[in-house]
Amino acid sequence: MMKKFFLIFSVLLLVYMIWPGPTKIADFKPLPSSVKSTLAGDNIEQVSNVAGYFSDNFRPFVTSFYKSNYWQKTLLPFPPIELIHPPEYAFVIIKKHTDSTYLEELVYPLRDSLYVNGFEPFYSDGSPKFWGSTKFDVDGDSFYTKTTLRFYPSPIFVRILVWLGIVVSVYGLSKVGKKILFNI
């Protein structure tokens, strides 16, 4: 019985880990009603798998938009897990000198992560959050927010190695556990 369970678990885990999904930041939709940023570090020519957008979309819309977009790209039966990180980590996770008021990670464990960083110097009603808050002026338009995305894909061979490590570890632990339990 345990061998069948272990075999089913191993196969399902392998299917989950090699299931196709996005491989680069360009696979994700641009933020609706936005202008793509051309600032230093906001495109993939300068920093890999990064995209920046100026818009009037605030955090609830942005995070739900990218959560559903990520879910659609993977076609898995469950959405990615949302993790909230302190905005101070943006300079490490996204890129140096990244302004941030929120940083969220959308992750499929043992696979990939999409980080959504937002800088919102204004509240949704247009009032400033900080003294000296200014709008983003881009190509003659003004925007309230800037969103920066960074995607961390994992190569398929790394996923298979991790799967192999998990399966071998679980098998070894079950053997050791049986010896301890039944040889007492």
Image (spheres, rainbow, N blue to C red):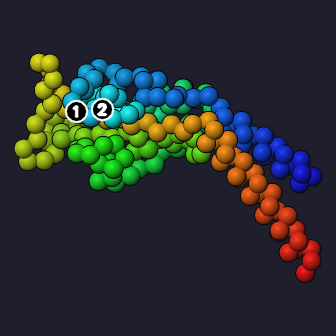
Q: CA distance from mark 2 to mark 1?
A: 7 Å
Pointer 1 local density, CA inside 10 Å: few below 14, some 14–19, many at least 20: few
| Residue 58, percent from left and from top | 29, 34
Residue at screen point 65% across, 48% down: 162
Which amino acid type is shown beneath numbered disc 1? Ala
> In the picture provided, is 27 more to the left or to the right than 85?
right
Q: Position of residue 35 (x, y in %)?
A: 25, 21
Q: Are marks 2 and 1 in contact (CB under 8 Å)?
A: yes
Judge whether residue 58 can be spotted in this image: no
Q: Residue 40 bears which disc, if any?
A: 1
**Label 1 SS:** loop
Q: Is residue 31 visible?
A: yes
Q: Residues within 10 Å of mark 2 (few under 14, many from 20)?
A: few
* Residue placed most toward the observer, 91 or 145: 91
Q: Is 176 located above or below residue 18 in the figure?
A: below
Q: Is residue 181 left or right of residue 64?
A: right
Q: Which mark is residue 46?
A: 2
Residue 43 position, x and y percent, is: 31, 29
Q: Quadrant of the C terminus?
A: bottom right
Q: Amino acid at mark 2?
A: Gln
Count of numbered tags: 2
Judged from this view, the residue extending furthest toward the bottom is 184
Residue 135, horizontal then vertical, whole percent = 13, 32
Q: Mark 2 or mark 1, which has the lower sequence index?
A: 1
Q: Secondary structure at mark 2?
A: loop
Q: Nearer the viewer, residue 108 or 171?
A: 171
Q: Residue at x 16, y 45 (%)?
A: 129
Q: Nearer the viewer, residue 129 or 21?
A: 21
